[in-house]
Amino acid sequence: MPNINTSEFRSGLKLIIDGDPCSIIENEFVKPGKGQAFVRAKFRNLRSGRVIERTFKSGESVEAADVLEVSLQFIYSDGDMFHFMDEATFEQYAATVDAVAGAARWLKEQDTCTITLWNGTPIAVTPPNFATLRITETEPGVRGDTASGATKPATVETGTVIKVPLFIEQGELVKVDTRTGEYVSRARE
Amino acid sequence: MEGSGCDWRPDASIDALRLRARVLRAVRAHFDAEGVLEVETPSLGSRTVTDPSIESLIARDGAGRAWYLQTSPEFAMKRLLAAGSGPIYQITRAFRDGERGRHHNHEFSILEWYRVGFDHHRLIDDIDVLLDTVLGPGPSWRLTFREAFSRHLGLDPLTAPLADLHDACRSRGFESGAAGTDRDECLDWLLSVAVQPALGSGRVYLLDFPTSRAALARVRTGSPAVAERFELYIDGIEVANGYHELQDAEELRQRMQRDIKVRSRMGQPVPEADDRLLAAHEAGLPACAGVAVGLDRLVMLAGRYRSLREVLAFTQDTA
């Protein structure tokens, strides 16, 4: 990959820092009137999600990271790897458990996810913001209780336990916000 | 024609532009009352600074000749001083390539003035009078470069070993060792990220810079020797840079040659030394002190704005 000069730093730019692909969150030009210019940048490590801060001398170059975000369909998991497919080309990609990380809690076959590819390999998986999931196990529902706001635990088909209102029955479909892990509403097929 | 949908609106609010106009009027009234002459010098020069930390923008005329957009009016104003102008001031645009950020724009306004017979301390008194008018009366402090580093970093910037400077940089997120950073660059970084923000609110004049950062200030012998240069910080933001001016033509020539060597070593553009400035120094620059104030930053501070964008009608992104 080409080297990127600090003058081209912009938020969202992907670079290799300490061997890992990172994305610039923000960067600041620092320069005393009569002195060396610096660029101070905050990065998100795209593998670990951690935020790091780095300073470069203005004019330094940093290796660009070949990072791409693609929409892929989740097809299956074999326990070790999660397999995804490009619906246009049918090309398949295998992501490690580490790369999938927390997204595994919501992944259902045929869901379309945003996958971050680094040199063609998945390094991060973002599930759809809202997932429609079936309740596989929960206490029997309390009919009519739609106002109390009380909740009970319920297991969804991916095995994740969420909190749902008391009126939700086993076997029902619910809409879940995958960013917060919270129940949103009942859902239909 | 393209047009619809373009971002045509100014960066600054009209209120900010009114404030700018008020500041300009106050500045002119101050110097008029003080008997300092307003001058204008060219924006396009056949020569430019050699300072390795300042890059010039270049304009080409129809014949292909390069003209340097001036990075400050300093050299031309010193030629006027050598010609017997007496005390002078100028409000002008200056241009510096590659400077772009919250407090930088590649084109900006400088207020620069020279007081014949003043040293830097008397010039600072003069600056304070002007600031009282523009920002409202307020106290100011004078602190040496050495005191500031020792107070805020526990380091003696003039004598600490380079390894200690690298350690101080590293603990603040800059792998200066790996970047092959020299002593001056370490001090620049530490000044910007550790000392400057710790100076607190109000006006602080930092005095007596290391001789390696003398720029065009005279050096005061002593142990160690220091440069009679100062910088003004207001609320931690660099606003002005001034000197008890170097007069010696031979010393000036040597500093320019040193700059040129650094530039060729670093692969930077290498402009010729300004021979007309050297000739003016040979003819005799009167003993004087001079200062350049970042006028946009001053307007920003006067209006309690947080970025230059809020006080520039159009920044380089919308120009």
Image (tube, rainbow, N blue to C red):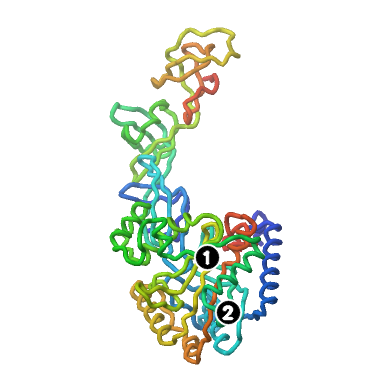
Relative depth, front residue between B95 and B213: B213
Vertical position of residue A61 compared to residue A182: above or below = below
Residue beneath the point at 66% across and 59% down = B10
Callout 2: few (<14), some (14-19), or many (20+) C-alpha neighbours within 10 Å? many
Q: Earlier in the sequence, mark 2 or mark 1?
A: 2
- CA neighbours of label 1 inside 10 A, class few (<14), some (14 to 19), many (20+): many
Helix, strand or loop at mark 2: strand
Chain bearing mark 2: B
Q: Which chain letter goes with mark 1?
A: B
Q: What element carries label 1?
A: strand
- Which residue is denoted by mark 2 in the rendering? B115
Q: Do we see residue B151 in this rendering?
A: yes
Q: Can residue B8 be seen in this view?
A: no
Q: Position of residue B167 (x, y in %)?
A: 31, 55
Where residue A100 appears, as percent x and y from the top left, is: 36, 33
**What kind of residue is marked 1?**
Leu
Count of numbered circles on the image: 2
Q: Position of residue A117 (x, y in %)?
A: 37, 43
Q: What residue type is labelled 2?
A: Arg
Above or below B200: residue B83: below
- The residue at 33%/63% (across/down) is B181
For the residue pair B18 and B144, the one nearer the viewer reads as: B144
Q: Residue sitting at 33 percent across and 42 percent down?
A: A121
Q: In this view, does B174 lie to the left or right of B60?
A: left
The circle on residue A110 is none
Label 2–label 1 contact, CB within 8 A? no
Residue A156 sits above or below residue A57 on the image: above
- Mark 1 sits on what residue? B232
